[in-house]
Image: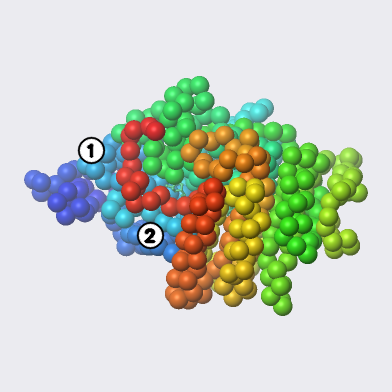
Amino acid sequence: MPSGITCFDPAQRRFLSGPPQPDHIPVPPLDGVLSTDDADLTWAAEDFGRVVRHRPLAVARPRSLRDVCAIQRFAHQHAIPVVPRAEGHSTGGQAQSPDGMVLDMRGFDTVGPVAADHVTVEAGARWSDVLTATLAHGLTPPVLTDYLELSVGGTLSVGGLGGTSRHHGAHTDNVLQLDVVTPDGSHRTCSPTVEPALFDAVRAGRGRHGVIVRATLRLIPAHTHARRHILRYNRLSDLLADQRRLASDRRVDYLEGKVKPDDSGTWTYQLEATTYFTPPSTPDSPRLLEGLGHITGGDTVTDTGYRDFLDRMADDVALLRTLGPWQHPHPWSNTLLADHTAEELITRTLSELDRQSLGGTGLALVYPILRTRLATPLLKVPDTPIVFLFSVLRTADSPDTLTGMVEHNHRIHDRVTASGGATYLDPIPDTEQSPTTSIP
Ligand SMILES: Cc1cc2nc3c(=O)[nH]c(=O)nc-3n(C[C@H](O)[C@H](O)[C@H](O)COP(=O)(O)OP(=O)(O)OC[C@H]3O[C@@H](n4cnc5c(N)ncnc54)[C@H](O)[C@@H]3O)c2cc1C
């Protein structure tokens, strides 16, 4: 074992190097590395949220399928929780393992080959790499998250929503087959027809029912360009009304919305409607905007390449990294609201927020998804024909503001669930923490 870790001491619950004592359990040989280095444990205790920090007992960096099976089997036999992790963009410790091992899946990043309507990728691949490979064949995943540097395994473990979800559902609705290593160390292949219970337990299963090692993803033909309209509104009710109007409308491919305070602290409401196209054909902008209630003359329109549109966060992220807020805590709240409750819940939440309590660069995302498109059993979704994703994305610049934001998130979540809505991307409650081989 390259790291020198040789055994596990079950009494002290720690991994050790050196010759095993009689009551120590030898760890299996690995192609990859098992580490208890301080830098690795610190890395595994951090995520994008920087709200909770739990150091694991060890970090495993598997290099082969055989490694993943051996680690899972060993951990299962000795009651050591194993939590897979990739890009660590969770915001509440979802990929941390306080009394167990973190399995760093970033080494599993092979993409392809690309076929006519699907691609098989390893779970640690990032969506940006998947997109690069598929666009070379004129193909694209039907749904992409706003930020492309998330891993395939990471988003398949939570859902994966984006501006085209109202047509195509979540990432988890666009996966055709998964290769999974279950907590008992067995390598199994599942799909809607082969081991469907396992398939349903792993999609949006938050890594607790098995490690995804490979996924076969649905692809559709890609356009080369995107026309992006940004429409402005004076009132939330007008924004929501147009989002409902466009929710099942095919004239727009991508639909999202943003609410943020302007320099004077007044809330501004924006709808983002993007249509994909391939020249020489171009979208008919007047028809696109027909019947909508935005502020006349307040809209902007830009044409970009398809990939540039999908990767539109890259420049902002680079700036936030340079200026610092990207590295600050992110106590984000993500919820899915029942349609008839959306306006009241968003209005009430905004009344409790201002520029300062959003953390300077913060904003809220609001967009509709058709309920019928979301068919992943473990993805909790309210039972109304249209549901609204409502995300409060904020940054804390001090421990005190962080505590206040986290408490506020709890109040938002209580209110949303009491009104028939659901939380999205939430950490697993302690009562459900243990990994399990049983498939719900
Ligand atoms: C800037 C930013 C933008 C985002 N935009 C969107 C968005 O537009 N839409 C959206 O839906 N979400 C969005 N998210 C949330 C994001 O989809 C989730 O946090 C996602 O889980 C992150 O993927 P990751 O690779 O960083 O996963 P990690 O944080 O490493 O892990 C997340 C979860 O997945 C599990 N997991 C990871 N790999 C595997 C695997 N191979 N097998 C089984 N389980 C695994 C982990 O155990 C954990 O429960 C965004 C997050 C950030 C920080």
- Name the residue at 56% across, 43% down: 382
Relative horizontal placement of residue 11, taking residue 247 as reference (left or right): left
Is residue 41 positioned above or below 324 on the image? above
Mark on residue 32?
none
Q: Amino acid at mark 2?
A: Ala
- Name the residue at 32% across, 45% down: 434
Percent from the top left, x then y, of residue 12?
A: 16, 55
Image quadrant in which you'd find residue 269: bottom right
**Label 2 or label 1, whichever comes before in sequence order:** 2
Name the quarter where the N terminus is drawn.
top left
Give how far apart the Cα atoms at labels 2 and 1 are: 24 Å
- Name the residue at 62% across, 68% down: 351
- Which residue in the protein does label 2 denote? 45
- Name the residue at 17% across, 44% down: 25
Image quadrant in which you'd find residue 247: top right
The answer to whether one can see residue 148 in this image is no
Relative horizontal placement of residue 426, taking residue 249 as reference (left or right): left
